[in-house]
Image: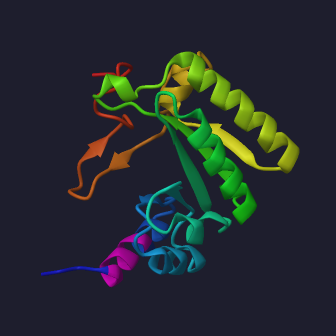
Amino acid sequence: MSCEAPCFSDLLEAVRHHGLKAGLTTNAQDPEKILRLADAGLLDMYGVSAGKGMWPRLAAHPRAVVNLLLLRNGMDQVMNWAVEAIRLGAGRLLLLGYKGTVSDFTPTTDELSQAFLLLNSLGKRLGTMIATDDYTRRRLGLTHTCGEGFRRIDIHGRVDRCCFPECEYRQG
């Protein structure tokens, strides 16, 4: 049995019924579906990655968080995405440092720090909220814990308290 949007809507309605909040990260391949869910009040927020799919169509929505993925030596790209997102009307940007298994892509802590400082400066001047994920905050020394109250549930129903399976901060 195939279950497309109606089943997903039912799931989100059940989440709401139980007093929980729902969010998702989208690849921006079907922005109209995401906008319908957000406008119906079924999503508290959604993340959309700058540079992926039809991300500009989703960036300005009040429930959108535009994800800015920093790769090593990728500061110019992140800043260009940030400027474009703000120009489109985005109100929230999230800086993410690459944390995959290809070490050549992992930004240095200095790059993360510089990106965070520049984005915060830009955000303050233009009234845009700037944030980072727990992993990046740990790398920058801004926190010593991850994932307080965080639960990731994948499409197969597996629950994980950590946002990333390869994280050096993962707790057993």
Identity of the residue drawn at 54% across and 17% down: 109
Q: In which quarter of the image is residue 86?
A: bottom right
- The extreme right residue here reads 125
Dominant SS type (magenta): helix
- In the shown orientation, is residue 137 left or right of residue 79? left
Count of numbered badges drawn on the protein: 0
- The extreme left residue here reads 1
Q: In this view, does 84 lie above or below 12?
A: above
**Residue 80 x, y percent position in the rendering:** 64, 47
Return the residue nearer the eye: 160 or 19: 160
**Residue 63 x, y percent position in the rendering:** 62, 64
- The extreme bottom residue here reads 6
State whether residue 89 appears in this view: no
**Residue 153 x, y percent position in the rendering:** 32, 51
- In the shown orientation, is residue 169 left or right of residue 111? left
The N terminus lies in which quarter of the figure?
Answer: bottom left
Q: Quadrant of residue 8?
A: bottom left
Magenta stretch contains residue 32: no
The C terminus lies in which quarter of the figure?
Answer: top left
Magenta stretch contains residue 7: yes
**Colour mode of the rendering:** rainbow
Return the residue nearer the eye: 3 or 100: 100
Q: In this view, does 55 lie above or below 97?
A: below
**Residue 25 x, y percent position in the rendering:** 44, 57
- In the shown orientation, is residue 89 left or right of residue 15? right
Q: Is residue 103 above or below residue 41?
A: above
Identity of the residue drawn at 74% across and 60% down: 87
- In the shown orientation, is residue 25 left or right of residue 164? right
State whether residue 156 appears in this view: yes
Specify start and end residues of the magenta stretch as a single range: 5-12
